[in-house]
Image (cartoon, rainbow, N blue to C red):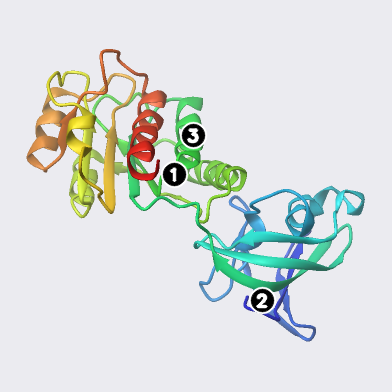
Amino acid sequence: LGNGTNLLVTDGPLDRIVVGTERMTQVERDDDCGLFALAGVPLARLACLPVEAGGAVGAVQKAHEGAAEIRVGDGRVVDGEGMENLCEVVSASKDEVALHCVKRSENRSESPCKITLYQSISKGERMDLTIQKSVELGVYKIVPVFSSRCVVKPGKDSKIDRWQKIALEAARQCGRGIIPEVTSPVGFKEALGEAKCNDLLLFPWEEEKGQTLKQVIEGSKPGAAAVFIGPEGGFSEEEASQAKEAGCKLVTLGKRILRTETAGPAVLAMLLYHNEL
């Protein structure tokens, strides 16, 4: 979708994208996430993730509401991979909006530290809230984890599609340059093994009384970090011991015990302040 290429977005059963004015190509659609793909390339992510209201962005966002709601003009659209596209509306109707890409530039909203949140799966809307606020605070990826005290057990219906959609909407609202991925759930030991590739591994635990998060991150600027958050009942002593053996830094977040849906965003906010402000 470089300069001179038109993108067609439609609210109906979309099975085609018009490139230029003549060529038509079959595409695949993920209805749950609202993403489109052509030969494995996420073409229409830029249409699904506007960074500001009005203009071409408003046209894409509100195309399904009817032509009366469409504002024709210029606007920025991001492609979900860290690039912004300055676009103008070529045509608009009730069912579809065609955009023309004028200029591409790098989105500068992303953190210099790629943070992966290993969030123990919580019950009901708590997980939804964790994902939404974590995306707003700059998380790079979210990995749901089945730890020993999780109320939700493996084998239940997967909510990955729902969680990914929440991440998409949160990224749209706060002007992210990427769409943070919400992966399939993993076990605790698998999560520890996967996280070892990060520069820093943080393991907040309510039983840790000595080492603080501030002490661990002071003077460091990690390029990638992993944050482990426990479920409603917290991590067990055995899990904390396994995490320490795997290289995690056990830290306290202060004198008060935080709920599972609060702890993750709280750590992300602390890291945001340390790395960006």
State which tag comes first along the sequence, 3 or 2: 2
Q: Residues within 10 Å of mark 2 (few under 14, many from 20)?
A: few
Residue extending farthest to the right is: 68
For the residues labelled 1 and 2, the Cα–Cα distance comes to 34 Å
Q: Secondary structure at mark 1?
A: loop
Q: How far across and how far down the image is residue 237, in percent?
A: 13, 23
Is residue 91 found left or right of 273 in the rendered image? right
State which tag comes first along the sequence, 1 or 3: 3
Q: How far across and how far down the image is residue 98, in percent?
A: 79, 68
> At x 51% / y 46%, what residue is drawn?
164
Instruction: Give the amino acid at mark 3.
Output: Lys
Camera-nearest label, 1 or 3: 1
Residue extending farthest to the bottom is: 22
Instruction: Give the amino acid at mark 1.
Output: Gly
> At x 34% / y 32%, what residue is drawn?
267
Instruction: Give the amino acid at mark 2.
Output: Gln
Is residue 80 found left or right of 5 in the rendered image? left
Point out which mark residue 147 bears.
none
- Residue designated by label 3: 133
For the residues labelled 1 and 3, the Cα–Cα distance comes to 9 Å
Point out which mark residue 138 bears.
1
Q: Secondary structure at mark 3?
A: helix
Q: Residues within 10 Å of mark 3 (few under 14, many from 20)?
A: many
Q: Residues within 10 Å of mark 1 (few under 14, many from 20)?
A: many
- Residue designated by label 2: 26
Residue extending farthest to the top is: 256
